């Protein structure tokens, strides 16, 4: 019975494309690279007060957060960090529309802190998780 359960878990992990070392989906690595590209463009906009560059980068960045690869990790802490990230990016876009240098700087900091906290949380997981059951594997 235990062997059948283990085989089922391994098949599920394979089908979902989960990297056991990171707990991240294979498509998740690509989407995180895209997120980094947009975040770098936003930082350029923040440091030069180029509000158009900020706005042009926040729109596709927010779109990334609604893709399946972004939402492939079904953990409460990940979902909470993701919502905080989205809110910070929304606030960043709003501050850019208002051309508020302090607002974009503060919102960029919040966005970055959400990324750092989330990635730290995912790295700190000692065992791979499957459907919320960390001891399943």
Image: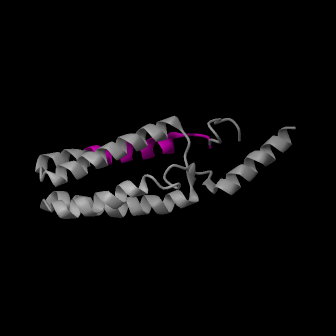
Q: In which quarter of the view is residue 84 placed?
A: top left
Quick one: quadrant of the C terminus?
top right
Q: Main secondary structure of the magenta part?
A: helix
- Nearer-the-camera pick, 70 or 120: 70
The N terminus sits in image quarter: top right
Q: Is residue 37 above or below residue 5?
A: below
Residue 66 vertical position relative to residue 6 in the rendered view, above or below:
below
Residue occupying image coordinates x 63% and y 57%: 17
Q: Is residue 113 magenta?
A: yes
Which residue corresponds to the image point at 13% horizontal and 51% vertical from the top-left? 98
Q: Is any part of residue 39 visible from this angle?
A: no
Q: Is residue 4 magenta?
A: no
Q: Is residue 54 visible?
A: yes
Residue 119 image position (x, y, % from top left): 44, 46
Q: In the displayed image of the protein, which residue is found farthest to the right?
A: 1
Q: Is residue 105 left or right of residue 21?
A: left
Which residue is depicted at the point 21% across and 64% down?
A: 53
Pick the front one: 55 or 110? 55
How many discs appear?
Answer: 0
Where is residue 127 drawn, in percent x and y?
61, 40
Picture coordinates of residue 97 (x, y %)? 17, 54
Q: Which residues are magenta?
A: 110-128
- Residue at left offset 50%, top offset 44%: 122
Q: Position of residue 30 (x, y in %)?
A: 48, 63
Seen from the viewer's position, the closer of residues 102 and 66 is: 66
For residue 94, side relative to residue 133 (left or right): left
């Amino acid at each position: 019975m235990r062997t059948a359960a283990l085989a089922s878990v391994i098949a599920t992990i394979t089908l979902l494309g989960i990297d056991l070392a990171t707990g991240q989906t294979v498509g998740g690595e690509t989407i995180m690279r895209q997120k980094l590209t947009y975040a770098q463009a936003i930082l350029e906009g923040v440091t030069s007060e180029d509000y158009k560059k900020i706005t042009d980068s926040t729109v596709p960045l927010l779109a990334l957060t609604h893709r399946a690869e972004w939402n492939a990790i079904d953990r409460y802490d990940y979902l909470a960090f993701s919502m905080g990230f989205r809110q910070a990016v929304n606030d960043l876009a709003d501050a850019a529309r208002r051309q508020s240098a302090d607002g974009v700087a503060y919102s960029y900091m919040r966005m970055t802190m959400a990324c750092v906290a989330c990635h730290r949380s995912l790295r700190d997981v000692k065992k791979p998780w499957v459907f919320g059951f960390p001891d399943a594997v």
